[in-house]
Image (cartoon, coloured by chain):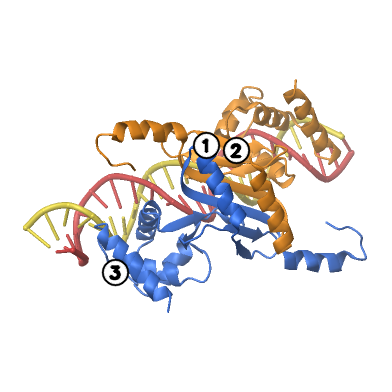
Chain colours: A blue, B orange, C red, D yellow
Amino acid sequence: MNAPRQRRALLEELTMQGVRLTPQRRALIDTLQEAERHLDANSLLELARQREPNLNRATVYRTLELLKKMRMIDELDLLHLEGEKHFYEVRSSRDHVHLACFHCGRIEEFSSPLFDELKAEITTQNGFGIRVVRLEVGGVCGACSMAREETNTDTAAGH
Amino acid sequence: MNAPRQRRALLEELTMQGVRLTPQRRALIDTLQEAERHLDANSLLELARQREPNLNRATVYRTLELLKKMRMIDELDLLHLEGEKHFYEVRSSRDHVHLACFHCGRIEEFSSPLFDELKAEITTQNGFGIRVVRLEVGGVCGACSMAREETNTDTAAGH
DNA sequence: CTGATTGCAAAGAATTTGCACTGCT
DNA sequence: AGCAGTGCAAATTCTTTGCAATCAG
């Protein structure tokens, strides 16, 4: 019972800001909020069309731009694991690191007090007013590196 | 007396890895290393052509790909401050944050022990083998936010 | 000598834009 | 009713690719 509340909040926030609520936008926002993975523009289009068949690709980009500007979503690249697309996620209460595994392609999220401290440091030491933070890490995830070690016990070529 | 030494190191590293050293690659690597700002593929092409006029755009991309794979350069987006280009920098000894000012467009670099600790935490807590780290922060830099405050003392709209 | 590297030109992927029409508030 | 929002199709921007010619080691 959490997602519906959050969704309403987003939609309300938009109307409060004087943004018109069209069926297209509703479909896009609902889709973004219910997504279980990070969506790129194209997947978002396809998924949102299941709710609102009358939805154009250009509208997707325009809406993403809008939501980005209103700081309701964050844009990620996930280190270009697949092509040059961007991925989007609804802004959560807490910034987190994205760990992208080059091997299996999985994305882990990780938040830590150290991250928050680092942000605080940036603000105080540089007088920098943070609006967006994007921390992406690429490498080999725990599961994959274990799998690799097993494979490599006989070859002795550990990487 | 530092840059030349570093340059030799990069070129040597490449030959050691059995990579052929063409004039084109030399020009690209020299240009990257002597650059005072973050270069995108197109600026890199233009600058490197001053050294090696016989240099094609495709070669630029292929070389960047090579250097990325060999972990000699890092790729940045700088939060798409201008278009969707990528920017490149020679890997330095220490990872650092990129602070991109939405107002004046300047890029500040910032490194901190906290950042290193955070990376260590990612390794130990997640068993994640880090290969690339990209931390990009967007907002308003110190200089610009001071300038804004002055402008806003009479309007009282402090953001 | 020979396979890696390049140039060229064309293709591709992702995103943006101009304009007439539509529909939210 | 009026203007923000949309669809459509064309344009842009950035990057990749196939293939023949070239060159580094």
Tell me the SS state at disc 1. Answer: helix
In the displayed structure, would residue B66 be above or below residue A63?
above
Residue identified by numbered label 2: B110
Q: In whole angstroms, how far apart are the C-alphas of marks 2 and 1? A: 9 Å
Density class for disc 3 (Cα within 10 Å; few <14, some 14-19, many ≥20) is few
Mark in front: 3 vs 1: 1
Density class for disc 2 (Cα within 10 Å; few <14, some 14-19, many ≥20) is some
Three-letter amino acid code of the residue under disc 1 = Asn
In the displayed structure, would residue B37 be above or below residue B137?
above
Residue A129: where, in percent of width, then height? 45, 42
Relative side of B53 to A156, left or right: left
Tell me the SS state at disc 2. Answer: strand
Q: Chain of mark 2?
A: B
Residue identified by numbered label 1: A126
- At 54% from the left and 42% from the top, the residue drawn is A122
Which of the pair B65/B24 is nearer the observer?
A: B65
Mark in front: 2 vs 1: 1
Question: What label sits on residue A23 in the rendered view?
Answer: 3
Residue B87: where, in percent of width, then height? 57, 39
Three-letter amino acid code of the residue under disc 2 = Phe
- At 77% from the left and 33% from the top, the residue drawn is B10
- At 27% from the left and 40% from the top, the residue drawn is B156
Q: In whole angstroms, how far apart are the C-alphas of marks 3 and 2? A: 44 Å
Residue A59: where, in percent of width, then height? 34, 59
In the displayed structure, would residue A12 be above or below residue B20?
below
Please report contact status of discs 2 and 1: CB closer than 8 Å, yes or no. Answer: yes
Three-letter amino acid code of the residue under disc 3 = Pro
